[in-house]
Image (tube, rainbow, N blue to C red):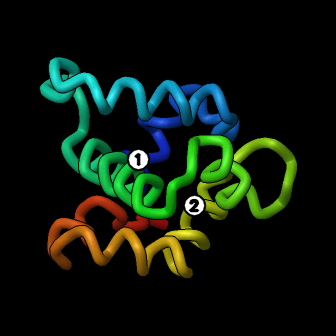
């Protein structure tokens, strides 16, 4: 979990729409994968698969993740989404071991 948040939100101030869009762009460029945390790449690809399955764009995902409605997604909001319906859909697309690595939460 920490690697995903650090990848999407490198400045640590909460994930905004432009950071989320940029993270998806980077993940979809295969040449950048060697420089990235494999767990973050895996998790972002799973999220992209959920978005495709649900026919939703980055804006819709952002709105779903941003439970507080403040325009930024916090680590807690991601954890809550992964613990709820979002995780169910992501889990359908991955093995248990792979998802445990990609979404492990360190407190």
Residue 99 in the image: x percent, y percent? Answer: 26, 68
Q: Residue at x 41, y 62 (%)?
A: 53
Image mark count: 2
- Name the residue nearer the viewer: 53 or 66: 53
Proximity of marks 1 and 2: CB atoms separated by less than 8 Å: yes
In this picture, is 32 found above or below 15? above
Up the image or down, 76 lies above or below 11; here it is below
Q: Position of residue 44 (x, y in %)?
A: 36, 47
The answer to whether 82 appears left or right of 18 in the picture is: left
Quarter occupied by the N terminus: bottom left
Q: Does 65 sit above or below residue 24?
A: below
View extreme (front): residue: 55
- Mark 1 Cα-neighbour bin, 10 Å: few <14, some 14–19, many ≥20: many
Assess disc 2: are there few (<14), some (14-19) or many (≥20) residues with their C-alpha within 10 Å of its C-alpha: many
Question: Which mark is drawn over residue 101?
Answer: none
Q: Residue furthest top?
A: 31
Marks 1/2: CA distance? Answer: 10 Å
Q: Which residue is mark 1?
A: 4
Can you identify the residue that label 2 sits on? 78
Instruction: Provide residue 77's location: percent of width, then percent of height.
Output: 66, 62
82 or 14, nearer to the observer: 82
Could you say whether the residue bearing mark 1 is in a helix, strand or loop? Answer: helix
Q: 58 left or right of 44? A: right
Name the residue located 13 percent from the left edge and 26 percent from the top edge. 34
Residue 50: x %, y % from top left: 42, 61
Position of residue 61 in the picture relative to residue 88 (left or right):
right
Q: In the figure, is residue 42 to the left or right of 65?
A: left
Give the mark nearer the N terminus: 1 vs 2. Answer: 1
Helix or strand or loop: what does disc 2 sit on?
A: helix
Q: Nearer the viewer, residue 90 or 6?
A: 90
Q: Residue 90 appears in which quarter of the rendering?
A: bottom left
């Amino acid at each position: 979990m920490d690697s995903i948040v650090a990848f999407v939100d490198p400045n640590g101030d909460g994930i905004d729409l432009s950071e989320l869009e940029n993270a998806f762009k980077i993940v979809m460029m295969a040449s950048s994968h060697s420089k990235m945390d494999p767990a973050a790449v895996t998790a972002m690809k799973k999220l992209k698969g959920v978005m495709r399955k649900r026919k939703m764009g980055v804006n819709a995902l952002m709105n779903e993740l941003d439970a507080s409605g403040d325009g930024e997604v916090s680590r807690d909001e991601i954890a809550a989404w992964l613990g709820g319906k979002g995780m169910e859909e992501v889990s359908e697309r991955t093995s248990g071991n792979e998802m445990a690595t990609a979404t492990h939460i360190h407190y």
